[in-house]
Image (tube, helix red, strand yellow):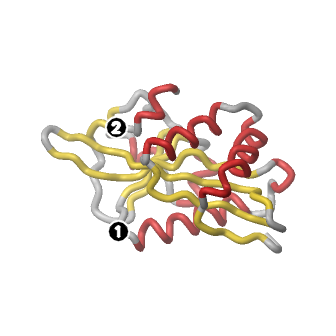
Amino acid sequence: MNGVTIRQAEASDRAGIRRVEERAFGQVFEADLVEQLVADGDTVLELVAERDGSIVGHVLFSRLGIEAGDARFEAVALAPLAVDPDFHSQGIGSALVETAHARLKADGERLSVVLGDPAYYGRFGYAHAQAAGFESDYQGEALQALAWGEAPTTGLLVYARAFLAL
């Protein structure tokens, strides 16, 4: 991670973020998702990893609702996490997630949900067991959650509108 700075994303970072998302995923879908989440105002936290003035990594957490009867609980959804392929295996993705988690916890967030590789996200404490009781179109082993405090374990996951295109 030599020479890499993790910081809050800024409006001037949009082109660099798009480039990282497209390179990391080999398609435009995730980059389009990021742009829509930002445009819709559904972003809770967005960080970039910067090296030598260039964006080399990006993570976004959007607002996620959990509905259980008449009750509604606010959580966050981690999606997407991207690191430029030229900078893989340098700890950048881990630094982005760990920095984001610390900020989210400090801001009072109590639950984060991710859809991804259990082996990778398990390193940060995400587990399917924490998410198994939720109703979701994405329910399965890849749906994982991480609680930082008292949080529901059942209910319907309501993602931001931008995810409807998935």
Which residue in the structure is indicated by mark 1?
108
Q: Is residue 33 above or below residue 20?
A: above
Left or right of 123 in this view: 144: left
**Which corner quadrant of the image does residue 13 belong to?**
bottom right
Residue type at mark 2: give it.
Answer: Val
Q: Residue at x 71, y 48 (%)?
A: 15
Q: Quadrant of residue 30?
A: top right
The crowding category of the residue bearing disc 2, from other C-alpha atoms within 10 Å (few below 14, some 14 to 19, many at least 20), is some
Amino acid of disc 1: Gly
**Looking at the image, which residue sits at the far front?**
12
Mark 2 residue element:
strand
Q: Nearer the viewer, residue 35 or 148?
A: 35
Relative horizontal placement of residue 12, taking residue 154 as reference (left or right): right
Decide: is 24 above or below 46: above
Q: Residue at x 74, y 39 (%)?
A: 22
- Residues 3 and 121: in front is 3
* Position of residue 8 measured from the top left corner of the image (x, y, whole percent): 58, 65
